[in-house]
Amino acid sequence: MLSNLQNYYIPKTIPGALALLEKNSGSILVVAGGTKLVQVDNRIVQELVDITHLGLDYFKENSGEIRIGATTTLQNLIDNKLVKHSPFKILSQATQLSYSSKMIRNVATVGGELISSDSLSVLYCSLLVLQAQIRIVGGEEFALAINIFLAKKGLGGGLLLETIIPKPQTEFYTGLAPIFHQNKKVIICACAHIVIHEGKCQDVRIAITGTEKVPQRLPEAEAVLEGKKLNSKTIEDTSDTACNIYHPIADTLASEKFRKEASRSVVKNALTQCLQEFEDQFDA
Ligand SMILES: Cc1cc2nc3c(=O)[nH]c(=O)nc-3n(C[C@H](O)[C@H](O)[C@H](O)COP(=O)(O)OP(=O)(O)OC[C@H]3O[C@@H](n4cnc5c(N)ncnc54)[C@H](O)[C@@H]3O)c2cc1C
């Protein structure tokens, strides 16, 4: 509980919000959906800046990118027609997997999720293979590649404005494969992205949660598939490499040994979905 709360501001402009954050830094926090903050026990925070009236609840699309505003709710992300269908559907699937409660998804925001999610975040995993960028404003405005943002963790008093997802000009295929604990939480999840040009894999991207401190790409496994045909043999080789090179975490959900073996299976399943998507277009 924020037991020492004294002021609640609802600015209408981004400069207005930033001025409040700068003036009262140390005792002020941003609030979006409030579903994480409601669980925080903190006596230092005296003021909150509500950012839900800054016009950051949007989806914008142009030929080169999709932009998702920070206060877009998780449910709106799941339902948006742009990300509900292939190949961006892994974004929608990832968000749905992270949350069992629609009530919370209707309130929690994409920005709040990106700031507060942990090493098992499936949303981060999907954003890694989509090579998303996060636009931030603090003293200045800048964009960070999602992997840098993940490594940095923390905005140092700034505001997360939006998530930018590039739209590749070539056709690409994606897959997302989780393994669940019996309590329905995701133990480990892999996401994959592949371009197939003249029958060969290009721009192979594979990311995984639950193996290190933050979700990460698997460059050594990606290299195994790059330039090869996508078939059951190359998928097997790639998932074996993924399993061999990574050192998983152990926690209350699963042991290190379980996660290591599971990494093979989730990478294989995510790549098989890419193959399926590729083959389906010829059946259609
Ligand atoms: C009943 C319940 C169930 C939940 N279930 C789940 C679950 O299944 N899975 C799960 O992952 N989480 C769950 N949560 C946690 C919570 O919903 C998530 O962490 C959520 O994504 C937070 O989003 P929010 O918009 O509510 O963030 P807030 O609570 O508003 O903010 C969270 C943090 O992010 C900062 N912040 C928010 N937006 C910005 C921004 N644009 N720029 C800078 N800083 C910002 C805030 O200052 C705060 O530190 C649950 C919470 C509750 C209460």
Image (cartoon, rainbow, N blue to C red):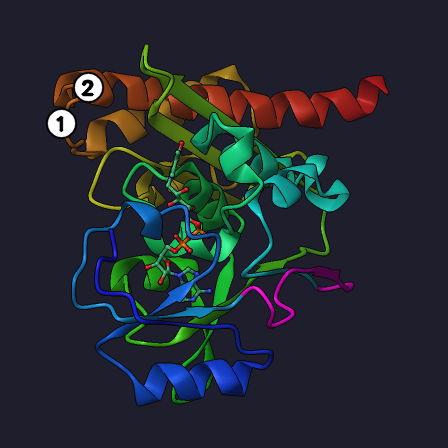
| Label 2 element class | loop
| Label 1 element class | loop
Image position, residue 151 (x, y; %): 27, 59
Image position, residue 158 (x, y; %): 37, 76
Image position, residue 235 (x, y; %): 46, 23
Other-residue count near label 1 (Cα within 10 Å), few / some / many at <14 / 14–19 / ≥20: some
Q: Is residue 56 magenta?
A: yes
Other-residue count near label 2 (Cα within 10 Å), few / some / many at <14 / 14–19 / ≥20: some
Query: From the viewer's perspective, is residue 129 above or below residue 221?
Result: below
Q: Which residue does the numbered mark 1 point to in the structure image? A: 250
Q: Which residues are magenta?
A: 52-64
Query: From the viewer's perspective, is residue 8 above or below residue 83?
Result: below
> Disc 1 marks which amino acid?
Ala
Would residue 157 be found to the left or right of residue 89 on screen?
Answer: left
Q: Which residue does the numbered mark 2 point to in the structure image? A: 254
Residues at discs 2 and 1 in contact (Cβ within 8 Å): yes
> Disc 2 marks which amino acid?
Ala
Pick the front one: 79 or 234: 79
Residue 118 is drawn in which quadrant? top left
